[in-house]
Amino acid sequence: MRQFQKYKPVFPALLALLCAVPGAAENKVAVHGSVQADVVLPQEDDAIGTGSYDHKILFNTYADVNLASRYVDAGLRAEFMKWPLPGYEPDFAGWGLSNFYVKGKYKGFELTGGDFYEQFGSGFILRTYEERALGIDNSIRGARVNVNAIDGVRLTALGGVQRRYWDWSKHSQVYGANAEVYMETWMPKLRESGASWMVGGSYVLKHERDEDIMLPGIDYRLNLPGCVNAIDVRSSFNKGPWSVLAEYAWKGQDPSFDNEYTYRHGSAVMLSASYSKKGLSALVQAKRSENMAFRSQRSRSGISAFINNMPAFTYQHTYALPALYPYASQYGPGEWAFQGSFSYNFRKHTPLGGRYGTRVTLNASYVSSLVHEGNPQAVVDGRPVNTVMGTQGYSSPFFKMGQANYFDVNVQVEKRFSAPLQITFMYMNQFFNNNVMKIVEKEEKYIRSNILVVDARYRFNRKFTLRGELQYLFTNQDQKDWAYGLLELSFNPWLMASVSDMWNCGDTGTHYYMFGLTGTYRNNRLMLSYGRTRQGFNCSGGVCREVPAMHGFQIAYTYNF
């Protein structure tokens, strides 16, 4: 109970504020929340390399409650992960009251105290968010002011300490300000033409106490900056089906574990253009980033303590085999990334559209490393030291590209053959540079694969639907070929049963079978499953968490109110 004792004053404070809300006595306070429990009963399985377990049951549990009214919102969340699911970083384990906040609202002004999430622009210099599947919750505990009282202008200012699992270190603070101006509010002709134009700018300051970082082999201590500044400027323009976004971010000297404690500035630039109308859409994006790892604690590694987020310009695959070799953004070394997508609907009653129409989508992604030039070497008392620590690091010519990190091109065809039958076909060609990601233990430099997917759905009536997947991955590297099959029967909206198998038919012959049953009733959802999970990576938004091989029962329960 000691985890909760230090938060005891929070509970009466929240209740007192809500009782003081105008209209609270008239039952105008809305209450909502949720409970989530993910439970695993693991079994040791030498065939897939699960290893041993210290506990017979592992679980992640969350419970939150939020109260909303006209002038005041409040909420809190408790978490229990004393024996967490496999694959999370060691400091993830713990329990207690992890999140609480009070928000006051009045005439375009909002003041938040407690824990909150925020994003400036695309997140290049600030993005705090929660992603439970990855074990990420980098919220800020402090205060934030939002101002929307001026037409066409949005202002934000914030400050506080960042959460890293169960640590809110007072030795590091994050401050920031953001402004966005919507020019159509001030330019009537622009507004009358149906166009919108936004101009925005952001500033983030990280203050972190000094620490002893020594050059290897000698008694020399790095002079670390106490404050690191970062700025972001951006502009977006929208008119009719067209949208264009340009964004630039810059970060000051920030020696850290991610950049080998070098002092080169960081930068990121992005251009994005899209076109969308009925039956047709297109997207083209380009991004260059260099030395943009921005953490509240400079000596941390892994996926924790990031202040910012660098989105991956790769297609987010939902099918099992295309997701075997995922790509994660390279924060420290940097990268050039390109992404494009084109989708077209062939109309009904045309040669290619047929009776029900046909949708064709083409996606392509290409990511390359930067070219690092020079031979930086620390010099102490006139003597060279064999390390890049303490130097400006490598130089990287802006337009020069290095070796390919990742490549992916895929074509999807969605076709309805009859009223109850719809089939999606996909072909994908993928290139993965294991020298960069190092997710394969074998001595494989590159992994090249071709993947075929067929996803069929047959709807018997309004209640019963049967869905099946067949997938095959061809490759001469790693564990060679893979096959995957799934059958899923749904009795809408209450019940769904599934069975699947991922088979390594090219090397080990191992089967990763899974049986699942999901039930939904009112606000409750319960999923039961049993089987094997392959060792791999769970990725979202350019961030990846390693997931170990697992065998056993899994239970997932959610309740929303």
Image: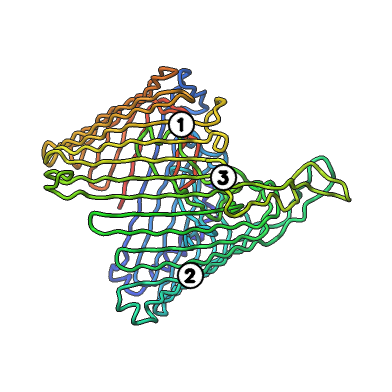
User: Marks 2 and 3: which is nearer the front?
Assistant: 3
In percent of width and height, residue 10 lies at: 49, 60
Whichever of labels 2 and 1 marks the residue nearer the N terminus, that label is: 2
Residue that appears at 53% across and 41% down: 404
Splitting the image into 4 quarters, where does residue 59 fall? top left
Residue labelled with disc 3: 369
Residue closest to the eye, 7 or 493: 493
On residue 175, the disc is none
Asked whether disc 2 touches disc 3, contact meaning CB atoms under 8 Å apart, the reply is no
Splitting the image into 4 quarters, where does residue 385 fall? top right
Residue closest to the eye, 394 or 92: 394
Visual colour scheme: rainbow
Splitting the image into 4 quarters, where does residue 434 fall? top right
Asked whether disc 1 touches disc 3, contact meaning CB atoms under 8 Å apart, the reply is no
| Label 3: how many Cα within 10 Å (few below 14, some 14–19, many 20+) | many
| Label 1: how many Cα within 10 Å (few below 14, some 14–19, many 20+) | some
In percent of width and height, residue 397 lies at: 62, 53
Residue that appears at 52% across and 23% down: 52
| One can see residue 83 in this view | no
Residue labelled with disc 2: 200
Q: Is residue 287 above or below residue 554?
A: below
In percent of width and height, residue 501 lies at: 33, 25
Whichever of labels 2 and 3 marks the residue nearer the N terminus, that label is: 2
Tag 1: amino acid? Arg
